[in-house]
Image (cartoon, grey):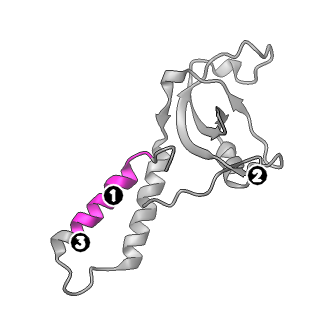
């Protein structure tokens, strides 16, 4: 299992994951803050809250801070409009999951005496594959 921090929006539980996405123009806002970034790939946080999915800019880590510190108005954020087919998992998040797994393995030490080594390694490989996979939205 991976150690995904609890994520919140407006103080309520939500689903959130780190991604990268290509910024799209947002015609609803004549002064859209990210207009100069249209067409570029940017770090973002995909937030699913209720029936809505939206994206926060995370280039400086502020989007992730927002959802992992209660999602309250005390944490500022910048919303992004993205190209829907451009969403990709964020590599840094995968690296964090693998490092957390490594730290847990180091703390656990070698297998207990009498444990078949092949089964112990198989269990470790399953954990590693799980850490490398993107967490599921409904997990």
Q: Looking at the rendered structure, which numbered label has been put on residue 11?
A: 2
Q: Which residues are magenta?
A: 120-134
Q: Position of residue 95 (x, y in %)?
A: 44, 52
**Residue found farthest to the front:** 51
Dot 1: few (<14), some (14–19), or many (≥20) neighbours within 10 Å?
Answer: some
**Res. 24 mark:** none
Q: Which of marks 3 and 2 precedes in the sequence?
A: 2
Q: Is residue 58 visible?
A: no
Q: Which residue is mark 3?
A: 120
Residue under the point 45% across and 56% down: 97
Check residue 128 in the rendering and tell me which mark sits there, or answer none.
1
Q: Residues within 10 Å of mark 3 (few under 14, many from 20)?
A: few
Q: Earlier in the sequence, mark 1 or mark 2?
A: 2
Q: Picture quarter containing residue 111? A: bottom left
Nearer to us in this view, 46 or 110: 46
Would you say 118 lies left or right of 71 here? left
**Residue drawn at 45 percent across, 59 percent down:** 2
| Residue 18 on image: x %, y % | 55, 42
Mark 1 in CB contact with mark 2 (< 8 angstroms): no
- Residue that sits furthest to the right in the current view: 74
């Amino acid at each position: 299992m991976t150690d995904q921090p609890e994520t919140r929006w407006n103080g309520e539980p939500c689903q959130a994951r780190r991604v990268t996405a290509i910024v799209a123009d947002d015609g609803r806002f004549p002064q859209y803050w990210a207009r100069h970034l249209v067409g570029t790939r940017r770090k973002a946080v995909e937030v699913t809250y209720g029936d809505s999915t939206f994206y926060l800019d995370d280039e400086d880590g502020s989007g992730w801070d927002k959802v992992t510190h209660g999602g309250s108005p005390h944490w500022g954020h910048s919303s992004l409009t993205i190209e829907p087919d451009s969403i990709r998992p964020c590599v840094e998040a995968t690296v964090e999951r693998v490092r957390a797994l490594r730290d847990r393995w180091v703390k656990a030490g070698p297998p207990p005496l009498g444990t078949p080594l092949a089964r112990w390694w198989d269990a470790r490989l399953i954990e590693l594959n799980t850490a490398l996979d993107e967490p599921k939205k409904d997990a």
